[in-house]
Image (cartoon, coloured by chain):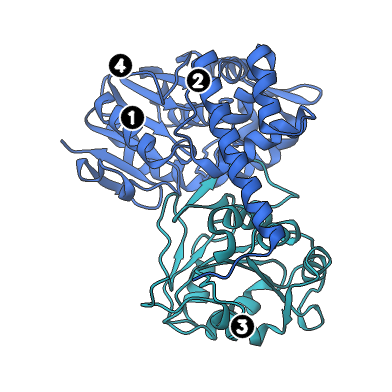
Amino acid sequence: MAVPLEREALAANAQLELENIELGLLLEAVYRQYGYDFREYAFSSLRRRVWRRVHEEQLGSITGLTDRLLHDPACMARLLSDLSISVTAMFRDPGFYVGFAEHVAPQLQTYPFTRIWVAGCSTGEEVYSLAILLNENDLYDRTRIYATDINQLAVDQARQGVYPLDRMQEYTENYIKAGGKRSFSEYYVAGYDGVLFDPGLSENVVWAQHNLAQDGSFNEFQVILCRNVLIYFDKALQNRVQGLFYESLGRFGTLCLGNKESMRFSAYEDSYEVVDAEARIYRRLK
Amino acid sequence: MNPAQTVARDLVAVGASWGGLQALRTLLRGLPPELGAALVVVQHRSAHSHPTVLRDLLAAVTALPVRDADDKCSLEPGHVYMAPPDFHTMVEGAHLELSVDAAVEYSRPSIDVLFESAAESFRDRCVGVVLTGANADGAAGLARIVELGGAAIVQDPESAERPEMPRAALAAVPSATVVPVEAIAETLVELCAERGVAV
């Protein structure tokens, strides 16, 4: 029933269809040449990130980017960073850490030893935040944190524990809102434009490359943190990764999602109980 | 209804910044419950702003259900979805996608990011609405909506609390329908599908 669109709009729609084909081919090329499977990533974010890379490489089309990355692994590495690194902050969503201290820490205090998986740790901000929280709840010494990310460069950066000085004011405010018990500056030493976090905070951290979309479970955990990572996956991949988490959690294990990620749209909704609805903390039941 | 215009639009993407609360309340108050389009709203606000108070203030003036967007939540006609602070909100097919990608022009959520994704998913079934604000967010996205066959509405800059954002949108899309905020609901009713009517 729609009247024909004006010619310009028809041309723009045809161009968009073509670009979607080019994007599909790029993802196929990345998978076949490099083994990374982004074909089930959330499409809108993916499209924006790929276009950003096209522009930064000063190319005119997605096909141009496909051509370059097939022949130049360094270009692939840059795209991998675009597709896998998200902008995060220490103690992002302070309410989550308050919820964790209130509902999860007391349970962990009854265990002799705890394994925690931070899945999709990016550049490590959340790992250090968690280590600080565990430390202040007398849990750190009997915890091992497995921090993984698809991007080896991000993992290497996270391992350094170096962060920009100009974000410390924001992180300090977050830390206070998150219920921090000390002075945040006790945890780092400031240099010229960066700060180095106390290496003691990463003493019990195992850093590793792991791809949620393609790799399997590697241990059994009491807690899994995966915050603002699933949003980058489409629904089918989200469900598969939820399956991976379910298999990797012990009974009554805790799953922590990002504050806009919901168990409601997942096939595993009935396998968990809600521990803290606002903080998106769930406990495996069966 | 314009006789040449028979596309039933069923997605309305709204962008508001400085002064947006009042403008959004006026807009939502005028919408009938049988509106056959989903509304997705980006209101610029601080990353640390209260997560639900904006939703509650808007829900108080309209019969349409107002929800805070969660990742992958489905779009339903006659519902209003608020982009949460500190995330980008995008339309993908019949649902919403969130991301924590870098801010665009200092904004997260960004109106341009919402509009571009809405345009690319809903094409000529999309309407973009730019309300009051003191920056230029939404202008590029509104142009994208129109480029793919969608419709554009801009709050009359003269009557907006801050005219810069509507002016920037008009500079990018001179053909946009310009109306005072009180008349936007009526304009949307003319452009959009009615609930229960097959599209």
Locate residue A14, reporting x and y percent: 62, 49
Chain hosting mark 4: A
For residue A123, say whether it is visible: yes
Residue labelled with disc 2: A31
Chain B rendering hue: cyan
For the residues labelled 2 and 3, the Cα–Cα distance comes to: 47 Å
For discs 3 and 4, the disc positioned in front in the rendered view: 3
State the image quarter where residue A145 is shown.
Answer: top left
State the image quarter where residue A90 is shown.
Answer: top right
- Kindly indicate which chain is depicted in blue in the rendered structure: A
The residue at the point 44 percent across, 37 percent down is: A230
The front one of B35 and A97 is: B35
The residue at the point 37 percent across, 48 percent down is: A262
* Position of the C terminus of chain B by quadrant: bottom left
For the residues labelled 1 and 2, the Cα–Cα distance comes to: 31 Å
Left or right of B117 on screen, residue B198: left
Q: Is mark 1 on a helix, strand or loop?
A: strand
Kind of residue at badge 2: Tyr
Label 2 Cα neighbours within 10 Å, binned few <14 / some 14-19 / many ≥20: some
For the residues labelled 2 and 4, the Cα–Cα distance comes to: 27 Å
Residue labelled with disc 1: A223
Which numbered marker is on residue B187?
Answer: 3
Q: What element carries label 2?
A: helix
The residue at the point 47 percent across, 61 percent down is: B68
CB atoms of marks 4 and 1 within 8 Å:
no
Image: A172 above or below B72: above
Kind of residue at badge 3: Thr
